Image (spheres, rainbow, N blue to C red):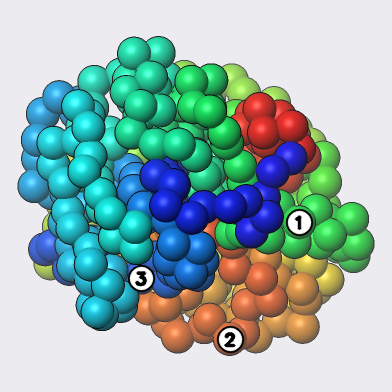
């Protein structure tokens, strides 16, 4: 496999796929970790005198439909500040060609606005390939997705290689999982229920116990009780029951609910068996926090992905904060991954207390499951 470090990039047009999918609130970046972790790659390309094209997605916009909410412009502004003095431009129309000089950086608008990106469309992959001489894949957090800018482009470009961040993430994760000590406790939450649910059975194989929160927990709970209007996946009830039979899964026994979903919503504590049709579960309750904390204290290795509740709303932040703090304070080796998980770590100032923070969420879980990722096979790793 070719590494970016070992390739001559002098005057070459390089298409660097990064994952700059950072959380934004009212157009402001709330956690810059993913961008900060990508900056050494950009600096390496500058040192090598390349003509640099940077591509990333942001969120999940509808294709072929510009929506300011999903624009990479705030990310471009952040990069401009961080790379002060460098000639850096932002391009909205780029599929027909990019005019760029050595040591200049062009940041492309969100690739997911392009029709076909998420379906790995061949014509689109070819268009990306036409923009460059070399493709550098360095988007670990999107490396589990087979899309035009992360995977398809490889089939059409003259040369492809792996970037330093992607390489260091997989190397570190491999080393960690080779040596991890039991008990291994997995803490899983968040809203990407269907993506994560598919990975749970493999995660359970390497885990001694799994503490579940967020939309994932609601899906498990819905197999046994009514969850009202809570975020959950109806189609996974059967699988949820089956996974629960492993006896490794721990579910909330109480929760904070609301009849509305907004930043000013007030919270009511309720037993899980008592949720009304007009209520939605937005956080775990106090007894659940206590139960989960006890398990965390006994763990030797902790794998954490996803918040326990809607931590963006102050009244539903406690569960995520308390669990994050117990993970941070535990003596276990803790591995956390994912955009929102990083945002939680930033919010509660716990960065220095987590043993390893991966930029990937889904990619991190899928890599744990399969020990590889589609793009790595393509790059012959
Ligand atoms: P993920 O990217 O899958 O880690 O999901 C993170 C998102 O999950 C955050 O934006 C949270 O607000 C959201 N979330 C966590 N718990 C819940 C819940 N009970 N209901 C709705 N959204 C939730």
Q: Point out the residue furthest to the front here.
A: 11
At x 66%, y 27%, the residue is: 378
Q: Are marks 2 and 3 in contact (CB under 8 Å)?
A: no
Reply above or below: 47 against 151.
below
Report if the CB atoms under discs 2 and 1 are less than 8 Å apart: no
Picture disc at residue 171: 1
Disc 1 element:
helix
Task: Please rate how many residues cluster around mark 1, counting C-alpha atoms within 10 Å: few if below 14, some from 14 to 19, many from 20.
Answer: few
Q: Nearer the viewer, residue 301 or 77?
A: 77
Residue 352: mark in rendering: 2
Q: Residue drawn 68% across and 55% down?
A: 6
Using the numbered discs, state the Cα–Cα distance from disc 2 to disc 1 in whole angstroms.
Answer: 21 Å
Instruction: From the image, tell me which residue sits under label 3.
Output: 32
**Nearer mark to the viewer, of 2 and 3:** 3
Q: Residues within 10 Å of mark 2 (few under 14, many from 20)?
A: few
Q: Is residue 284 above or below residue 30?
A: above
Query: Would you identify the image quadrant in which residue 62 lies?
Result: top left
The answer to whether the beta carbon of the residue marked 1 is less than 8 Å from any atom of ligand 1 is: no
Q: Estimate the x, y position of residue 170 in percent, counting from the top left.
A: 71, 52
Quick one: label 2 or label 3, which is nearer the N terminus?
3
Left or right relative to 228: residue 25: left
Front: mark 2 or 1: 1
């Amino acid at each position: 496999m070719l590494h970016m470090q070992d390739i001559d990039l002098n005057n070459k047009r390089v298409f660097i796929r990064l994952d700059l999918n950072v959380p934004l609130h009212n157009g402001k970046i709330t956690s810059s970790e993913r961008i900060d972790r990508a900056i050494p790659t950009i600096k390496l390309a500058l040192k090598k005198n390349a003509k640099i094209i940077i591509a990333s997605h942001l969120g999940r916009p509808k294709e072929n439909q510009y929506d300011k909410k999903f624009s990479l412009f705030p990310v471009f502004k952040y990069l401009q500040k961080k790379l002060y003095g460098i000639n850096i431009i932002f391009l909205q129309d780029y599929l027909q060609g990019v005019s760029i000089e050595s040591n200049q950086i062009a940041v492309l608008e969100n690739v997911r606005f392009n029709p076909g990106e998420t379906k790995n469309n061949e014509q689109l992959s070819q268009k990306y390939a036409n923009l460059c001489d070399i493709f550098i894949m360095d988007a670990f957090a999107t490396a589990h997705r087979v899309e035009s800018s992360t995977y398809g482009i490889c089939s059409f470009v003259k040369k492809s290689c792996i970037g330093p961040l992607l390489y260091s993430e997989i190397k570190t994760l491999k080393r960690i999982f080779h040596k991890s000590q039991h008990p291994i406790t997995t803490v899983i939450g968040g809203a990407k229920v269907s993506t994560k649910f598919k990975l749970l059975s493999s995660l359970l194989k390497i885990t001694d116990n799994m503490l579940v929160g967020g939309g994932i927990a609601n899906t498990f709970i819905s197999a046994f009780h009514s969850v009202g209007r809570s975020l959950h996946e109806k189609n996974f009830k059967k699988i949820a029951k089956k996974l629960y039979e492993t006896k490794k899964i721990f579910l909330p026994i109480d929760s904070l609910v609301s009849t509305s979903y907004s930043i000013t919503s007030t919270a009511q504590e309720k037993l899980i068996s008592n949720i009304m049709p007009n209520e939605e579960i937005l956080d775990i309750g106090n007894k659940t926090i206590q139960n989960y904390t006890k398990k965390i204290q006994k763990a030797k290795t902790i794998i954490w992905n996803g918040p326990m509740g809607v931590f963006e709303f102050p009244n539903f932040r406690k569960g995520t904060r308390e669990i994050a703090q117990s993970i941070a304070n535990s003596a276990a080796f803790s591995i956390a991954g994912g955009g929102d998980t990083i945002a939680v770590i930033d919010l509660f100032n716990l960065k220095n207390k987590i043993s390893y923070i991966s930029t990937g969420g889904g990619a991190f879980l899928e890599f744990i499951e399969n020990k590889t990722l589609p793009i790595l096979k393509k790059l012959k790793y």
